[in-house]
Image (cartoon, helix red, strand yellow):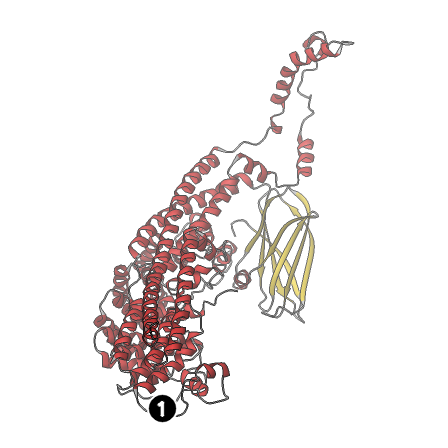
Amino acid sequence: MRQSFRGIALACLAVGGMANAQFEYEYEPAAGSFAFNQALYEFYSQDHFSAAVLALGLEQQGDDADPALSRFIADNLLDYGLYRDALSRYRRLLQADVLSADERAAIWMRIARYEYERGYFDAALATLTEMRVDVGARRERTARAQLLAQIQMRLGEPAAAVNALNEGRVYGNSDFARYNLGMAYIADEDVRRGRRELDILGRQLVTDPTEHALRDRANLALAYNYLAEAKGGSARPVLQRIRLNGPYSDEALLGLGWAEIASDRADEVRQTDADNVDTIAGVLGAILRPGKVDEDLRQRLGLLRSGNEPETEEGRFRRALVPWLELESRDPKNPAVLEVQLAIPYALAELGEDDKARQFYERAVIRLERGRDGLDKAIDGIRSGRMVETMIRRDRDREAGWNWRLRDLPDASETYYLAKILSENQFQEALKNYRDLRQLQRRLAFDKQRLTDEGFAQNRASVNPNRLIARRLADQPPLWGSVPTTLKLETQLRRFPRNETLEGLLAWTYRYAPSLRLQLEQRSPGFAAPSLPLEMAELGQRIDITLEQLGELLRDARALLESIAVGELERQKSQLTRYLIDARFALARQYDKSQLGVPEE
Amino acid sequence: MTALRAMTLLFAIAWCGSAAAQGDHYAELQLLDQRIQSLKAQALELSLASHAAQTQYLYPDEQRLRLFVTMDVFDFELDSVTIELDGQTVSEHSYTPREVYALKRGGAQELLLTNLAPGSHELEARFVGRFAKREQDAPSYEKAISLSFDKTRAAQQLELRLEPRPRGRELNVRVFAREAGE
């Protein structure tokens, strides 16, 4: 079973926004240029390397520089990750003033997005600054402002990001921009304004799955911001807006429990009228009504009293257990599910339910230990080199380059733990580079095979051999045609041994046959095996050198990917170990507590 | 108060977990990216030279035949094509949705590059696909053509273009001879 990549992609959207949306550019088949249409096929098939090779070949044949062809080449070079070469072409095109304002704006944004995603933040900032003076910039105003703000946030300049997003009220045109504005205000310590933007976004009526995910994300960010100040009363209604089965529901359920416990403090947030059955508020409300949902869960909540709870600390702990018990049975690889393994027995202990608390702590220790073993196995899996190869297995021959996206996660244990990091630009870009190298390695090896003696002979003989032989024989002069008619075997070959014994015949053959064979070869050079032209042999040698360099780069690229992934897993393991230590200490306390009531023998 | 203390502790852990900057590998990524770009540029140059050399030496003008597929029909999902030359299967291709899209956007797919002796030859092409988009259960539609052509002593390019028929869900295949530099 493949793990859905939707959640990751959505998480990425909320952080990256437009930066991850590929700009769709289009080319029309050039009228009358059949050769260009071949490159076009490669382009639309996302084989950008082949498209670039074909288009460069066309450019070499052409007399005049064609700006449209040059743009096509530059686009394919960039898509293949040849940033430097693409940039120099784009610069020439931008300076030559041969493009429309739309085209110029699109080029500026493509350059800046590439720079941002590959981590060239200063270069991206410079590109967007330069873009500003171009009239085309107005057409991409919202996208430009968002990307600028993301870079400024990444560079630790939230005030500049706020200015970028406020300029011309771009946040009014895009929900992503509004989300980023809210986060930028909070990072700039203008918490009140930040909360306001996130609250507006979190209360929107939405239908589209992407908008829904963004709304959930805004609510989660806002609620956790309240919880950081222990304002559970404000966080609770915000968390209840989040969908129970959305990508952020685990974190929301965890936070909701803490919000219940700290519900005595509140801010000014209202609960939206837009809540419905698929939100946490709707579903948890139903759980509390007898006979509605999941009897098993109700039984596990048997210690809870139904109805309105008084605003006591005990009541708050009991209400906290509702979302936590819902979360407890979910995928234990999620950090929120791991944390709740400790939160539940903690709340039970506070309620004086020591036996139940001890049972939950024991179960938590088992689960956390199992989780740590799983992480160890995943780390081993990564170090064995299996992970990276599995990830790029899909579409392995496609040359999409920078355009390629990891669409879903392979069914390997390590990838379950890596959902967050896989959505980050640095991992995605490193993975694309690795994939490009593997693809290039196959392509060069294929070229090399055709440039060897064997490959050359095989490919030249691709014509039907029967026809080739028939034609060659038709063109061939008679085999003995050029042999002087005066040739007499008896004279030339000296006393051909008629009526000789077998030994004598063989001795004669060994002595004279070699010279006869040599003579025949010289007279029919057309039958000799074709030899590899020098130009091709040299190319083959250059490919060998490139393949050697490529092997070295592949090792380094894989090492980088593994180092990012292992780093993330080690971080998770260290967090899990902390939980495990807490659980064991708490369990020991529970045992001590239970021993206090037992009389000594 | 106990509760709030515990909450702070646990949240500190969770918050650090989610907000802590992952090890930033951008510097390493960029160094590697620079090296990879140089190698890609080198490979591109090699590929151009190799493409030209192979055309010159492996497929000399006198024998070179290229066969292309194009599409001028938008409600047809091409699944596969099979080409036979003089009774022998020389090319079979199964299409991905992306490749079909590329054909519909006006791309010309080079399906076959081979050497063929000048003279008369028989070509058969079989196209298989479906008319309804994204409906795997839609009935399969097959269109086959057969033609004789003369391979000249110059490099030759043939385009097989799928076109809709004026009535009903049927296809035509038209064959065009294309000049090498066209």
Closest to the observer: A331 or A348?
A348
- Mark 1, residue position: A309
Q: Where is residue B31 in the image (x, y as percent from the top left)?
A: 30, 51
Closest to the observer: B167 or A191?
A191
Left or right: A192 with respect to A386?
A: left
Count the marks: 1
Label 1 is placed on what type of residue? Glu
The image shows residue B152, relative to residue A478, as above or below, that is below
Closest to the observer: A206 or A3?
A3
The image shows residue A53, relative to residue B107, as above or below, that is above
Left or right: A196 with respect to A398?
A: left
Q: Which residue lies furthest to the right in this view?
A: A499
Residue A174 visible from this viewpoint:
no
Where residue A507 sits, quadrant-wise, is top right
Dot 1: element: loop
Residue A145 visible from this viewpoint:
yes
